[in-house]
Amino acid sequence: MSAAAKSAGAASRAVAGKSASQVMAGIGAEQIAFLGEYEASTKDKQVFVQILCWPTVATAWPLLTQAAKALREQRGDTTMLSAPKGDPSWMHGVAPQLGLPLERDLGAAESTLATLIRRLPVRFAVAVVEHEAGQNQASDALRYRSLLSGCLTAYSNYLKSTKQTACRLVIAPNQDPLKNEMQQRVYHEVLPHLDSTSRLGPLELAFWSEATVPVPLEMAQLAAAAVGRHVQHPTPASPIFETIRAHLAPPSRFHSLSRPTRRK
């Protein structure tokens, strides 16, 4: 086993025994990135999205948290973030802290959140995997390898072009223990083989298991859902998707692991 693989394995075991909030202790907000995930199936295809979001200035995440709080106060919703009556919007489903205050005005909800994100000093890197209906799907490990390598490659290229240093921690949404362990393993397998591994430094991956997630993680989930929904239904244009696309760091990748179906 190589020295890089041993180091990655040790780091993975060290993080695996702690909650994300414990790993975050002592790390400044500007040193934390967030990983949003989305998957959905239709009769035609299955779509998987990962989107990495990081701050470009130290105050980005405090600004987002303050903006979300102000939004709740302006909309008169400072109590429990319970589900609204009736059919909630897709935004509430993936980002309740951001979406709930806007449930009374769904017509303006997307544009309001798009404006909020547009004003933030943040960037995104996205990777998308699609499987056409009727085709064999790749394994979870192969899919995560493609998604993670796509996001991390775009992030490292951004670091190179801006001469910035990497964040120290990536917070991802919590899944079942086996999926978390598999994604952690794939993450540390991918990292040493990227062309720009040295720029990413000691970047670790942790999963948020607490009930209330950080607002930046909600925003990452919202961004991933907006991209996934656009891949499924490119029209009409989504204000949130357009904002995310304008904030993308190249080369963010939209591609498929499945081979195209041959036409007869």
Image: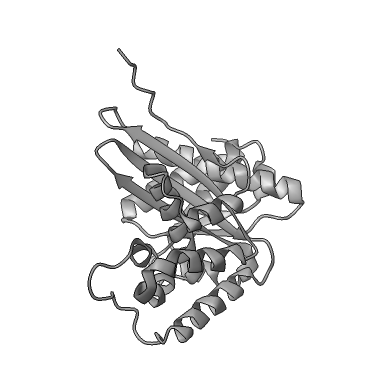
Q: Residue 124: image x %, image y %?
A: 57, 53
Q: Nearer the viewer, residue 130 or 153?
A: 130
- Left or right of 78? Residue 247 is right
Residue 21 falls left or right of residue 42: right
Q: Nearer the viewer, residue 153 or 231?
A: 231
Q: Quadrant of residue 140?
A: top left
Going 65% across and 36% down the picture, which residue do you hit? Answer: 195
Residue ID at (49%, 58%): 240
Furthest residue to the right? 163
In the picture, measured across the screen, residue 78 lies left or right of residue 85, that is right
155 in relation to 213, above or below? above
Q: Place residue 192 in its image quadrant.
A: top right
Query: Measured from the top left, where is residue 35 in percent x and y?
Result: 49, 56
Tell me residue 151's x, y (percent). Answer: 54, 45
Q: Is the residue 36 above or below the residue 230 in the image? A: below
- Most extreme residue toward the top is 264
Against 186, is 136 above or below?
above
How many numbered dots are placed on residues in this image? Answer: 0
- The residue lying toward the viewer, choosing from 37 and 203, is 37
For the point 59% across and 49% down, which residue is it? 248
Could you say which quadrant of the image residue 169 lies in?
A: bottom right
Quadrant for the N terminus in the image: top right
Quarter of the C terminus within the rendering: top left
Q: From where the camera sits, is residue 105 visible?
A: yes
> How did the renderer colour the structure?
one colour
Residue 183 seen in this snapshot: no
Q: In this orientation, which residue lies closer to the viewer: 42 or 27?
A: 42
Q: Position of residue 103 (x, y in %)?
A: 35, 73
